[in-house]
Every structure is written in C-alpha cells, then in structure tokens.
Image: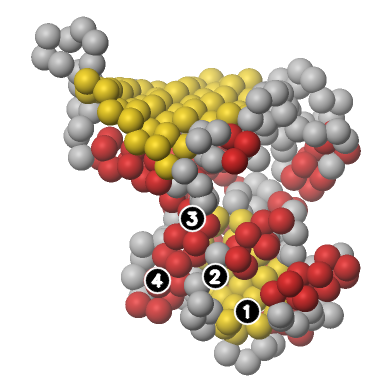
Amino acid sequence: MKAAVIGCGLIGKKRALAFPSNVELVGCFDEATLVAESFAAEFNTRNFASIGELLEVQNLEFVVIATRHDSLHSLAIAALQAGKHVFIEKPGAINLLQFEKVCEVAHKRNLRVHVGYNHRHHPAIKKALELSGNGSIGEVMFLRGRYGHGGRLGYEKEWRADKSKSGGGELIDQGTHLIELSIGILGGLKLDYAATPNYFWDMAVEDNVFMSLKNEAGNIAFLQASCTEWKNMFSLEIYGKTGKIEISGLGRSYGLETLTFHKMLPEMGPPLTETWSFPEPDDSWAIEISEFINDLRTGTNNSDNLESSLEVLRVIDEIYLRTNR
C-alpha cells in the first residue's frame, strides 16, 4: 500500500514513523522546502514540488494531512478529488462548515476519511472505555476532564494564537480531545455552559476553556483545557453509580499513564482499588493508523469517526458563537 504525507512537521513525522512495514511512503510535500527536504531524507522518500504532482503518483492509496488547521479541509478535498483516501489531523477543519464539505466530497467519491484522534487509542483510555462500557462502574453519571500545558516562550506569536490560522485557542486545540472522548463515553452532547477567557497569554484566542456538555439523559461532561497549566497534565475521571475510573498522565511530560479503578462495596465506605500503569513507549499513533489501513484493506469501518468528528466541531462552533469568540 502506497501512502504520502502532506505537512512534514512534528505530527507528520509521528504519523510517518507509525506506518506499518507493509506501507510504502512514496512522497511528501511541505510549503517549507527545507522542512520537506529534511523529512524526505529522514524517511528515504521523494520531496515533491507541488501537491498536484504528489497526488498523481501511480497507485497512491491514501494521504496523511498534518498541516495547520486552516489548510486541512482544502488539502483533504484536493486529495479526495484525486481519488485518494485521507487520514487528516484533528480537528479536520477550522470549523464545522469546512468539515461538512470534506465529508460531502468523501461520500460522493466513496472514499474514507479518518480524523486523527489518537488519544482514544492510549491504553489507559482503552481500558477505561472497556470498563465503563461493560458495566463495571454501573450506569455512568458524569465525567470530569482536564488537559493542559504551559505554552512556551513566544507561544503568543505562533500560528495557534492566530484565529484565522487555528480557528481558535485551547478549545480547538486540546479541547477537541476532551470533547471527542466525552462523546465516546456519553454519546451525543449538547452545550450547557462555556467560558473562553484569556488570562495570561497576550493573544486574541482563549488560553483557557471551561465547558459543561450534556447528553439527552442529563449526564454531564465537565471539561477544562488550558495553556496556563504550568505542569503539563491530563486527567479524566468517569463516575458511575457503583464505581469510579480515574486516568492520569499520557506519558512523557504529562507523566506516567495510569488508570485507577475504584469499586464501590455494598456497604459503601472505602472502595476496592486497583491500579494499572502503562509506561512508554506510546503506541497509540501506530494503533490508530493501522486500524485505518486495515479498514482500507478489508472494507471494515472500525476507524470511521466522521460522525463524532462532526459532533466535536458542532460543539466548538456553538461555544465560539455563544462566547463571542
């Protein structure tokens, strides 16, 4: 199976490194010529002078798109119109309208599009989805999620601080992962409350987002994403009627990935507690791309996340509308 990468930065490299051995990386493209040349040398592939030329490669089956948010949808549409399946980085587009156009072209051409939400493939999160789904904590009542980093010098001058290029701040950056995971646990969600303040960074987009999302049954996801979190952190807690699941860390600067399962006793009081630890390396990137590739080979739909990706952007659009962002 032949593949190509558009966008040769950090995430493009991570995706290329995650390719299984039966995938041939036949080319790459990046507007930054030196970045593309370095990528091509590292992965022993060809740096193409244009996207059009790259998409004409014979028997090219899918394209990974790992660029800035403002170019994701146009590049995806170009690849789809050239007859290629697409693996596109989250959030898939700068807003809901753009991503709906991507989905429309994909349906018309009968091609696959997967949005890269690798967090769902982290071992602690997979274990949590299994436990919450099989009734181990009883009926899920609510969940609480926090995700944050502290930025870096010059962060307010990067493309993520420019709404025209990023689509927004922490909500459309790390907040997308929290929303996507919440949908996986609670199903379809609607906005209950949101705030998108800017507390620290001198930029037009929000450096924090606080949101409360609710499903039809009234179960709430209470979430915060922040780039004023001076010690990188990830925390997701799922509360059921007979137990609680707590995930902490994602590896590297976010700390050791762990899952703690608290099982309520009939007499209540202190619960039975069991903890699993998942040391690095992080294989979520490889698992996600392999699932997508397997779907292309077999015609299965295990990696299909178009509907949930649309829901994520629908929530984001509503938050920005409500908070005048």
Q: Which residue has dot 1 on it? A: 25
Q: Which residue has dot 4 on it? A: 295
Q: Is residue 300 above or below residue 60?
A: above
Residue type at the position of mark 1: Leu
Horizontally, residue 100 falls left or right of residue 112, namely right
Between discs 3 and 4, the one toward the N terminus: 3
Between discs 3 and 2, the one toward the N terminus: 2
At 67% from the left edge and 88% from the top edge, which residue is drawn?
57
SS under mark 1: strand
Task: Give neighbour class at mark 4: few <14, some 14-19, many 20+ (Cα, 10 Å).
Answer: some
Q: Which residue has dot 3 on it? A: 283
CB under 8 Å between callouts 1 and 3? no
Residue type at the position of mark 3: Asp
Residue type at the position of mark 4: Asp
Between discs 4 and 1, the one toward the N terminus: 1
Give residue 102's position: percent from left, percent from top: 59, 62
Q: Which residue has dot 2 on it? A: 19
